[in-house]
Image (tube, helix red, strand yellow):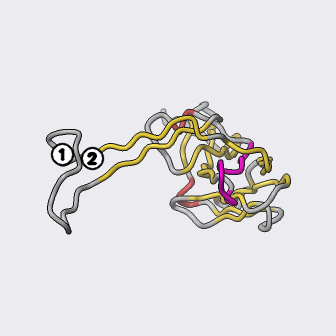
Amino acid sequence: TIPVVYLARLFMVATPFPTYSGSTALIKSTLFKVDCTAFYQHAAGKTVAVLTDASEHDVTAAATFASTDAGVVSTNSAPSVELEGNAPGVVNITSTWASVDAEPYELTVTDTEALTTAVRISFSNLVTNTLLGPRGTQTDVKVRVEFSD
């Protein structure tokens, strides 16, 4: 026998952007203003197809996305969907895959600031913790910023 399955549900979620280890397990419903800046957080959009056998499949790369108000949240196209907070407000993000519309996803943008809680700088090519070298010396630097949300 060959099991036959069909689409039971199509939904979307938003996760932190840029992505980092473990970020896809977090769901974003509010984009905060970034501490000490005029900018708002961004989120990564994801569309999931649930089949009648309860299996879930990421169909983001083939989906299209839209915002009910691009002045509040703008979207870009797949395969890597970025939802960019632009101004305070509430919008519905819609996603379409295979001519089927996903359930609308409500996303809030707020002027409440996500406060900086930690900044970590690491240098990949240093033998000691001292920055020392002739003028023009270059090294790779990684900066990790953590926020209160």
Quarter of the figure that contains the C terminus: top right
Label 2 packing within 10 angstroms: few (<14), some (14-19), many (20+): some
Residue 21, percent from left and from top:
43, 37
Q: Which residue is drawn at 65% across and 46% down?
A: 14
Relative height, residue 55 to residue 13 (above, below): above
Q: Is mark 2 on a helix, strand or loop?
A: strand
Residue 9, percent from left and from top:
71, 42
When asked about the image quadrant of residue 53, the answer is: top right
The reply to whether discs 2 and 1 touch (Cβ–Cβ < 8 Å) is: yes
The three-letter amino acid code for the residue at tag 2 is: Phe
* Magenta-colored stretch includes residue 31: yes
Q: In this view, does 50 lie to the left or right of 121?
A: right
Q: Which residue is drawn at 85% across and 54% down?
A: 89
Q: 7 or 114, which lies in front?
A: 114
Label 1 packing within 10 angstroms: few (<14), some (14-19), many (20+): few
Label drawn at residue 87 = none
Relative height, residue 11 to residue 97 (above, below): above
Relative height, residue 53 to residue 85 (above, below): above
Q: Residue at x 70, y 60 (%)?
A: 38
Q: Which residue is under mark 1?
A: 126
When asked about the image quadrant of residue 54, the answer is: top right
Residue 120, percent from left and from top:
41, 40
The three-letter amino acid code for the residue at tag 1 is: Leu
Q: Residue at x 71, y 47 (%)?
A: 32
Q: 54 or 3, which lies in front?
A: 54
* Magenta-colored stretch includes residue 37: yes
Q: 66 or 125, which lies in front?
A: 125
Q: Which residue is under mark 2?
A: 123
- Region rendered in magenta: 30-39
